[in-house]
Amino acid sequence: MRLIHTADWQLGKPFGRFPQEVRTALGEARFDAIDRIGALARERDAVHVVVAGDVFDSTGPADREVVQAVTRMGRAPCTWWLLPGNHDHARSDGLWSRVRRAAPANVRVVDTPEPVEMEDGAWLLPAPLEHRRTREDPTSAFDGMATPDGALRIGLAHGSVVDFGARGEADNMIPPDRAQRSGLDYLALGDWHGFMPIGDRAAYSGTPEVDRFGRDEPGGVIVADVRRGAAPAIETVETGRFRWLERNWKLANLDDFERELRALRASVDQAFTLVRLVLSGTLSLADRVAVGRTCSDELSHALRWLDVDDASLTAQPTEDDIAAIDIQGALATATLLLKARVDAGGADHPVAAAALERLYVEAIRATEGAR
């Protein structure tokens, strides 16, 4: 049986730290991912899509978010199996009752730990979460879920097979050999937002639309061909629209910056890319100002979003830099004093460097304005 495995849609995620236009674009991309998954199901003849938790970002999404989600799923020629995760855990007469009332016939909610027949000879074993955090293994019930002899057994769960950076005891822990323990032909997992296989019969699909920095790879899903008594054939397929990139550029001159910039521009669609950029190194004053101008006047407008940390990018003024300031009297004296403090590298170096850079920028602006 061929199915699509996806997870961690987190529909309705607010993306609160971004400007409104960026928040809107990121939010809509998550709903559009449903359409892309539906199109992939049609293209690959997959009649089932299993969603391993965190369909929604919270247990209280807006009505529009619920209706948008199920309407888009309803247009696809497949059955969608939705599992409550830790963000959208199951509660009595809560979110999932609302989803059921709004959903078309091809959208199925699996919010009880009971096996359900997907099609003739194939059974889904769900492990819905009833709380955001639990110390219990949510898949322990699989051992007691009986299915007909010879049937495919497909597990669907949301939790941590490994501790994803949590401190102390981890939540929703799933044993790494759960597929073998419970006689599963495939275990579709959610919670980890990147693709990660767990042995030969379990995997995390990752999110179809990346939603945070720390993962350079685009969002995607798994297309799995599941066979009784054999390891499934797994293929990852890219579905993401936006890229979230972290870059650290150590610069010795303007050429270094321009080379890195060309490589970035050649590798991404800038309109659909968010970048967190850390700059370090030592440049001439002219080069540092040129880098700052390119970031603020060009790159920040070409990218969907740009955050630049240049606190570790220092300026070492050259004689040409000082000559370019072209001032006399008290300001000339101040310029030379600031340069001396920068050259000395003492405790007041950052303040002196910033002041000297400001003088340089204003001098260049005055020169450009006089032309």
Image (tube, helix red, strand yellow):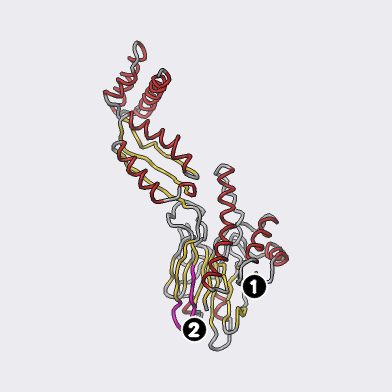
Extent of the magenta region = 222-232
Mark 1 is on which residue type?
Answer: Thr
In screen coordinates, is 332 left or right of 71?
left
Question: Residue 16, percent across and down?
Answer: 58, 46
Instruction: Report if residue 227 lies within the magenta region.
Output: yes
Q: Residue placed at 49% from the left, 68% from the top?
A: 222
State the mark number for residue 34.
none
Q: Can residue 239 be seen here?
A: yes
Query: Looking at the rendering, which quadrant does residue 313 occupy?
Result: top left
Q: Earlier in the sequence, mark 1 or mark 2?
A: 1
In screen coordinates, is 172 left or right of 339?
right
Question: Residue 244, percent across and down?
Answer: 46, 51
Question: Residue 364, percent across and down?
Answer: 38, 23
Instruction: Report if residue 177 lies within the magenta region.
Output: no
| Residue that protrudes farthest toward the top in the picture | 329
* Image position of 319 with respect to 12: above or below: above
Residue tagged by mark 2? 228
Q: Residue placed at 52% from the left, 60% from the top?
A: 208
In whole angstroms, how far apart are the C-alphas of marks 1 and 2?
A: 24 Å
Q: Residue placed at 54% from the left, 73% from the top?
A: 46
Q: Can residue 169 be seen here?
A: no
State the mark number for residue 112.
1
Position of the C terminus by quadrant: top left
Q: Nearer the viewer, mark 1 or mark 2?
A: 2
Q: Circle 1 sits in a helix, a strand or a loop, which is it?
A: loop
